[in-house]
Image (cartoon, coloured by chain):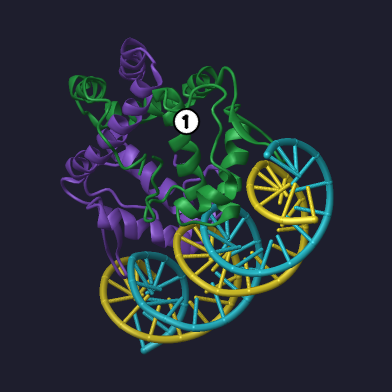
Chain colours: A green, B purple, C yellow, D cyan
Amino acid sequence: MVTIDKFSRTPVYEQIADGFCREVLCGLMPEGAQMPSVRELSVLLATNPNTVQKAYLELDRRGVISSAPGVGSFIRPGAAEAIREGMRSLMREITAIARELALAGIPEEEVQDCIRSAYRDPASIQTEKE
Amino acid sequence: MVTIDKFSRTPVYEQIADGFCREVLCGLMPEGAQMPSVRELSVLLATNPNTVQKAYLELDRRGVISSAPGVGSFIRPGAAEAIREGMRSLMREITAIARELALAGIPEEEVQDCIRSAYRDPASIQTEKE
DNA sequence: CAACTGTACTATGGCGGTTAGTACAGTTAT
DNA sequence: ATAACTGTACTAACCGCCATAGTACAGTTG
């Protein structure tokens, strides 16, 4: 299930969107699967319908879901591909941070180890990108 | 020189603090070097004295500078070491992002290449952690 | 028709960042 | 001592983003 960290600096609506992206990538939400309704999810997450709607809008913008009034919101065909494409920006982030670490004199091997450990144990639950 | 990206999501005062940390690591600001005065820097960066002061407070908190009324602010002995120590949090960031990429099915090799390229070309100027 | 769906809109409150202005205290040079 | 600098503290105001609340409308489904 998608969970919300009330104390995270990343907005709730982004946490929701990111959470569903993760579920799509895991196969928990296959193409064509129906999303919970805006109102329903807002109850489940103990948040506001508007916040959920904003999350869905974000997912739509990312090409992950498409919605229709009266019908519902569904995982788009090719959603996983679209998400993967969006992940490229994360690679740019990683590169930027690595440059900082390089400048700071942190040995490259240590940073590579971070990557290795992340890939060795990708299932572990983390606290979002702080 | 420290530069400000007005459109970045990272606060100006953090950009200033990060910028000086970078200069310390580069050797542009050696131990004992005097920082520009709060008012002077606020003019140079076309920002507010309060914002600069907040940046200096942050640098003090990080153990990078120490200030004295009437005298000025100076790079602390061991500043570079303190900065390097603080960099550990960036490694946690990298690990978290790498986990996302792992989950997304991005090949580990591609991410490792990001790190490698960052270390091969650490001098290139980037736009901060977006 | 009733019950659901997404969507739109306004209003409100809170928080953080920034700007603005003023003021005070300590140091340094003249 | 005076003037000109230094850091520091404080209040007030503004803005933008996020979240909440409530209402309303339109489309679909049973």
Picture residue at 46% right of the left edge, 54% below the top: B41
Question: Image height check: is B126 above or below B68?
Answer: above
- Indicate the position of residue A105 as horizontal and vertical percent values: 22, 28
In depth, the one of A53 and B105 nearer the eye is: A53
- Indicate the position of residue C11 as horizontal and vertical percent values: 71, 71
In depth, the one of A107 and A74 nearer the eye is: A74
In depth, the one of A54 and A77 nearer the eye is: A77
Residue A61 left/right relative to B87: right
Read off the residue under disc 1: A21
Identify the chain of the residue marked 1, using the numbered disc in the image: A
- Indicate the position of residue B40 as horizontal and vertical percent values: 47, 57
At label 1, the amino acid type is Cys
Can residue A123 be seen in this snapshot? Answer: yes
Picture residue at 36% right of the left edge, 56% below the top: A7
Q: Secondary structure at mark 1?
A: helix
| Residue B19, image quadrant | top left
- Indicate the position of residue B16 as horizontal and vertical percent values: 42, 48
Picture residue at 22% right of the left edge, 49% below the top: B32
Question: Image height check: is A116 above or below B84?
Answer: above
In depth, the one of B84 and C11 nearer the eye is: C11
